[in-house]
Image (cartoon, rainbow, N blue to C red):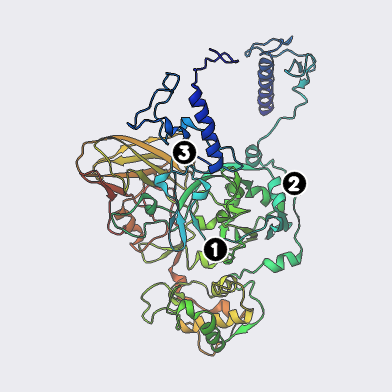
Amino acid sequence: MRVRIAVRTRYLSLAALTIWMGGIGCAQGADGPAPDSSPGGDQAGRVTHNVPGFGGDGPVISTDAVPPHVSLETRLASRTVPLRFGYGRPATPPDILVWDIDVGPDGAGLPEGSGTVDEGGATYAVKCAHCHGPEGEGGVNDRLVAAADGSGPRAIGTYWPYATTLFDYVRRAMPYDRPGSLTDDEVYDLTAWLLYRNGLIAEDQLVDQGSLPGIAMPGLSLFVPDDREAYRHVR
Amino acid sequence: MAGADGVPIKPISRRRLLAGAAGATLASLAGAGAGDADGSDQGETGLPRSGADGQQTAGQATDAADTTKSIGRPISELGSRSPHENPRRVLRTTSSGTPHEHLHGIITPSDLHYERHHAGIPNVDPANYSLLIHGMVERPLVFTLDDIKRFPSVSQVYFLECAGNFPTRATEETRPAEVAPLTSTSEWTGVPLSVLFREVGVLPEATWFLAEGQDGAVLGRSIPVEKGWDDALIAYGQNGEALRPEQGYPVRLFNPGWEGNTSVKWLRRIELSDRPFMTREETSRYTEPISDGRVRQFSFVMDARSLITSPGYPQVVEPGWIEIRGIAWSGRGKIDRVDISVDDGRTWAPADLQEPVLPKAFTRFRYLWEWDGRETAVWSRAVDETGYVQPSAQEFIAARTARSSYHHNPTTGWRIRADGSVVYRTQEWA
């Protein structure tokens, strides 16, 4: 109830302001021109006045008829945003299928197909080595294969926490100059070669949607969630 | 003499009227800003002569720089900077940064907003644009750009900062823009993501969402669903116009106060889930070492930071009054205070903060200082409304190790030499 009164008061003062402005440069309305005076009105709560440019028979502003405006911020805070505006169209299964390319750490989203270390090595030499070095040691772009002693820049074998991320990233973004051009089998092949070269799988291991999520990654133990807080000191 | 509107008008000599007409003709021939045709009015002594009617022409400087002797360039459909102003972004290998020392106030001109992309800037046709929201929702929906613009809109001023915003070199010849190039502030307009969350009916079990772009990297980040209910925007406007292509035209996600990479550009898909997706950009990248040898993940918020933009290299200053100027920002809310040291960090005093101080936006600070001409160094240190104090380099390295470049925010300063030259106050690592 209190809210409603506040809103009505706001509209009343708006009406008063309009009347006051209307009083400048034209005949004052019967309701009086003073900015601090309350507007007059009939018993239904309507306020009548003259508006410049509308002659002496101006529009009627009714404080009851004006729906109180509620800001988006207020609606969001009070959960009174319309639940639905009805904009947009339903997404069809093909809409989703064509874009839904992500692969989760549990393997969700991995496609059919498989890859081998041998095939991966052949594809790597043709499509990847010019940026990442013949052995994955790095070139104009990142080192992919960790040094034997684990030193040096972070690489897949020392830093990446999930093997599934390899598939996801190579498929969506590699090769850098032709992103999205690899077949799923090529991506599995490259994933197998990279995991093998980082010492994470045997040379004859087949990589597919069944095996990839289960491959243990040494980097996983490094990761901790953000523990900073609104806090006095750096952390 | 009085004009029709009652304003007195000075008598104008016939010669000056003719000169003005000639100048206008020249200006229209040259396209813009032609020299003053009244140069003939100047005697060989270089001093202005009297007019033929015996009356001196008004505005006696009659050389080409006298803009009062010709008509200026005409109106145009699209404005441009003064030809005398030439701010340029600071180019790095994979990014370009905001030239802070050339800017005033808190709004970064859109064409000087920093940029960082993972596979270049796609050319997205707005007529073919759509945003898919699916996953753990009641109603998976596809929105066109027009659909997105129909929803209730908000406009908010927010900074954006790349997680990796640090000086790449540590020489004295480092400009302010090179200390923190990858941060900028704009007014962003869009629909609150929470409105779209209601439209699709996000299920209660959804805890994360994937935001994915349509660039060549199809860049994806996992975002806690709370950010979408809080203040994330689906933004299509920047500083009063459509987003710049470098900023994700036609639609980007905008996560106020969070590392820039999470505000996915050229946004095409949002998928609600009950776990993070562990994309490359939140595992191999955008994770940082901390002091115990571990690696911090999902460190979204950008901590408070400040930068003195003037004086700075390569300025040369003179003894006397100097207004130290700069910007400060915090991903946790408003800037509460910026402390300035004019004695190389020994003592600190608060600067003036220019109103309005907005949460998660640049705050301009000013500190009027009378320099006595002796060598010193000036520093700034931001404190935000949570009480967080911008750390020194020593404090930062102790917490994060010297290898940490993400979320880099130590205090920085400028050395002012006795000859007035200003150089970057180099520190242990940067």
Comes first in the chain, label 3 or label 1? 3
- Chain holding disc 2: A
The Cα–Cα distance between marks 1 and 2, rounded to whole angstroms, is: 35 Å
Residue B174: image quadrant is bottom left
Discs 3 and 1 lie in a common subunit = yes
Residue A112 numbered tag: none
Discs 1 and 2 lie in a common subunit = no
Please name the amino acid that badge 1 sits on. Gly
- Give the mark count: 3
- The answer to whether residue B71 is visible is no
Q: Residues at badges 1 and 2 in contact (C-beta under 8 Å)?
A: no
> What percent of the width, then of the height, locates residue A83?
72, 46
Q: Is residue B160 above or below residue B34?
A: below
The Cα–Cα distance between marks 3 and 1, rounded to whole angstroms, is: 43 Å
Mark 1 neighbour class, 10 Å CA radius: few under 14, some 14 to 19, many 20 or more: few
Q: Is residue B48 above or below residue B122?
A: above
* Secondary element type, mark 3: loop
The Cα–Cα distance between marks 3 and 2, rounded to whole angstroms, is: 59 Å
Please name the amino acid that badge 3 sits on. Gly
Q: What residue is shown with label 3?
A: B35
* Secondary element type, mark 2: loop
Q: What residue is shown with label 1?
A: B120
> What percent of the width, then of the height, locates residue B97?
45, 54
Q: What residue is shown with label 2?
A: A85
- The answer to whether residue A36 is visible is yes
Which one is nearer the viewer's eye here, B65 or B323?
B65
> What percent of the width, then of the height, locates residue A53?
74, 19
Which one is nearer the viewer's eye here, A144 or B105?
B105
* Secondary element type, mark 1: loop
Mark 2 neighbour class, 10 Å CA radius: few under 14, some 14 to 19, many 20 or more: some
Please name the amino acid that badge 2 sits on. Phe
Q: Would you say B129 lies left or right of B104 here?
A: right
